[in-house]
Amino acid sequence: MAFTRRTALGVAVATAGLGRSVTAQAQAFPSRPVRIIVPFAAGGPTDAIARWVAAGLEQAWRQPVVVENRPGAGGSTGSAVVARAAPDGHTLLITANSHAINPAVLRNLPFDTLRDFTPIIRLADGPFVLVVHPAMGVRSLGEFVAAVRARPGAFNYSSAGHGTNNHLAMERLKAMAGIDITHVAYGGAAPATTALLAGEVQATINNLVNSLPHIQGGRMIPVAIGGLERSPVLPDVPSMNDSYPGLTAVNWYATFGPAGMPVELTQAINAAMAQVVRGPAVADRLLAQGITPAAGPADAFAREVAEEVATWAGVAQAAGVRPE
């Protein structure tokens, strides 16, 4: 068919109509209750953040916002629910940066991490912390490295499981510091923490939220923070980056939707969530746990996700972690 002036006018009219339709969809959202899938069990940091954000969104949107926990398979079970949902914003995913790690460590994911989701907003960043059992007798990262280096293979560390972010973070530290410490995988952060408290292992890299009560109680000794800077809740603990530039261990918490969401709708949800997470009702709770609100634009977060998927693939390969 020849592309005539008449067909050009028809395309222009259709395109303008589509633009109005998408804009109207964003303005009308939400038209019914919104479901937020958390792909982990209730009670953890991701679940808490999702519920805090949901409460704020209910007030802003004047629609119920229901948090639904769908744990399993490293977060992929719940994420798959969102990947299969309609791209209308009424089914969303709030997850952690294991979402970017899973392609490197899990076989046969039921979705493509980059192709099947719309990155919406990076809500907050929570640093991990390297903690040791008091019986190890070290109080700094330098002392920890020296102790492990002096007795290669004599010490163990726990993780939340094979290929989890705290497993890969310790493997990065091992490579950068040139130390040999044995990995013991547990079935989640809670048993990995319990193992350290019981003295079954000597160290772990754990999220700060879970570790802080034990640190305050003297049952764990913090030797390094995983963020680029010190944490305001542990101001005397240096960061890993101070000793090993480029070494970080940070857990981000973020929102994704199904692939194919209109840009205007994505931006509208981003703006609403940014306002909630920066408001005192949520921000104060986050900061009290050592978690920093992030809330940047959707397009920047999409680039970060793509970069992290590639980075973690390289880390897993260098550490000899094979997908399971």
Image (cartoon, rainbow, N blue to C red):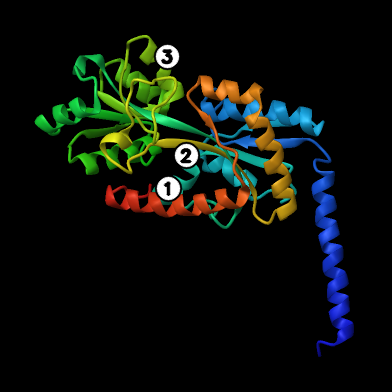
Note whether 201 is above or below 125 in the view shown.
above
* Label whose residue precedes the other's in the sequence (1 or 3): 1
Q: In this view, does 252 lie above or below 58?
A: below
Q: Give the class, few, some or many, for how many residues have Cα within 10 Å of label 3's Cα (few <14, many ≥20).
A: few
Dot 2 amino acid type: Gly
Q: Distance between the residues labelled 1 and 3?
A: 32 Å
Task: For residue 118, say whether it is visible.
Answer: no
Examine the image and state in which quarter residue 219 appears: top left
- The location of residue 260, given as percent across then percent down, is 68, 56
Q: Please, what is the three-letter code of the amino acid marked with disc 1?
A: Leu
Quadrant location, the N terminus: bottom right
Q: Label 2, secondary structure: give it.
A: helix
- How far apart marks 1 and 2 lie (CA) works out to 8 Å
Quick check: 293 above or below 21?
Answer: above
Which residue in the protein does label 3 denote?
213
Q: Where does label 2 land, which residue?
A: 74
Task: Give the side of residue 43 with respect to residue 320, left or right.
Answer: right
Label disc, if present, on residue 143 of the rendered structure:
none
The residue that disc 1 covers is: 106
Report the amino acid beneath label 3: Pro
Q: Is residue 57 left or right of residue 220?
A: right
- Mark 1–mark 2 CB contact (< 8 Å): yes
Residue 120: x and y in percent read 63, 46
Q: Nearer the viewer, mark 3 or mark 2?
A: 3
Compared across the picture, whether 99 is left or right of 323 comes to: right
Front residue of 268/113: it is: 268
Any part of residue 47 in sight: yes
Q: Position of residue 189 (x, y in %)?
A: 41, 27
Q: Label 2: few (<14), some or many (≥20) within 10 Å? A: many
